Amino acid sequence: MNFPFDITIILIFIAILVIISLIFFFSNNSATKERLKILLERQDIFQKNIVDMLEKGVNKIDDKFEKSSYNQNQNIQFIREKIGLIDKAQENINSLTENVVSLKNILSNTTKRGRFGELILENLVSDQLPKSHYDFQKTLSNNNRVDCVIYSPQSEGMLCIDSKFPRENYEKVSKSTTKQEEVHFLKKFKNDVIKHIEDVSKKYIIPGETSEMALIFIPSESIYLDIFKSFPDISDISQQRKSFIISPTTLWVILSSIENIVRDKRIKDNAGLIQSHLSLLIKEIDRLQYRVKKLDSHFSNAQNDLNEILTTTKKLTNKTQKIIKIDMQE
């Protein structure tokens, strides 16, 4: 058993005290063997107590070390689990970062951004309306191709929707570092918006072919709100050109209204057919009622016949009993 250095010093000190005590006892001219024997016995007891005390101390140290080692292992396992969760979260963050970068690349490219707006527009329209009431990438009589057209029952012509919206200068506004740059790019963005409204009006409003108005779809609610917040007069310009800017939310409202109109028209167109089917249904119900009454009369006749059979059976039973009694009297 290896003792710590300080315990070894204590033992050496005790040994020195014992030796000094022995010398003291032996230095007396009348020191007896009995005194030496008592001293040795006390020394043995003292040594045993010291050894027991040291062993208990070592055992406590071992227990504490084992407990500390177990706690450390538990902590290490806990840390490993947390590190695993952190690694998984990091993978999710990396994946999300890649998706955000990919979306940013799409929105920074004019062609890809236009296609991105077209996809959102197509999804909204196809989810809301029957297939027979819309077309995508429709070429008009003036050789202009519009992103989407909607055939509404209440409209004299098809409703054209454009989804290619200029936003280059809008992004420059958000990246401006000075107030002067912000004002400059904000003005350019307003000019882009006005020009796009005029272009849509010229391309997609054709008397006798299309509706008297056209829609400009912006696939971003934030840009839509910023336009009307920064340029309140855009509403008047849109009204004059009959080209109205819409967002995904406003488009959904418009599509829901058209869907209700389509449903009402279907019901109206099928009203005659529904009426004829209702007449046939009423006739069948009358026929069923007649047959139920007829069946009820059959049940009534059958019940009467059954009652007559029971009466005859009862009479036969009485006659039989009378015959049996006559045979017994003979």
Image (cartoon, rainbow, N blue to C red):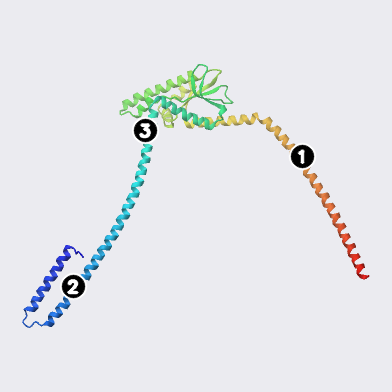
Whole-angstrom CA distance, mark 3 to mark 2, is: 78 Å
Label 1 or label 2, whichever comes before in sequence order = 2
Report which quarter residue 271 is drawn in. Answer: top right
| Mark 1 → mark 2, Cα distance in angstroms | 119 Å
Query: Relative to 68, is 270 above or below?
Result: above
Q: What SS does tag 1 mark?
A: helix
Q: Which residue is mark 1?
A: 287
Q: Amino acid at mark 2?
A: Gln
Q: Which mark is residue 257?
A: none
According to the picture, the residue beneath numbered tag 3 turns out to be 101
Q: CA distance from mark 3 to mark 1?
A: 71 Å
Amino acid type indicated by mark 3? Val
Specify which label sits upstream in the sequence, 3 or 1.
Answer: 3
Q: Is residue 75 left or right of residue 191?
A: left
| Position in image of residue 134 (x %, y %) | 54, 26
**Above-or-below relation of 301 to 10:** above
Per the image, label 3 sits on a secondary structure element best described as helix
- The residue closer to the viewer here, 71 or 254, is 71
The one nearer the camera, 196 or 122, is 122
Crowdedness of circle 3 by 10 Å Cα count: few (<14), some, many (20+)?
few
- Crowding around mark 1 (Cα neighbors within 10 Å: few <14, some 14 to 19, many 20+) is few
Q: Which mark is residue 47?
A: 2
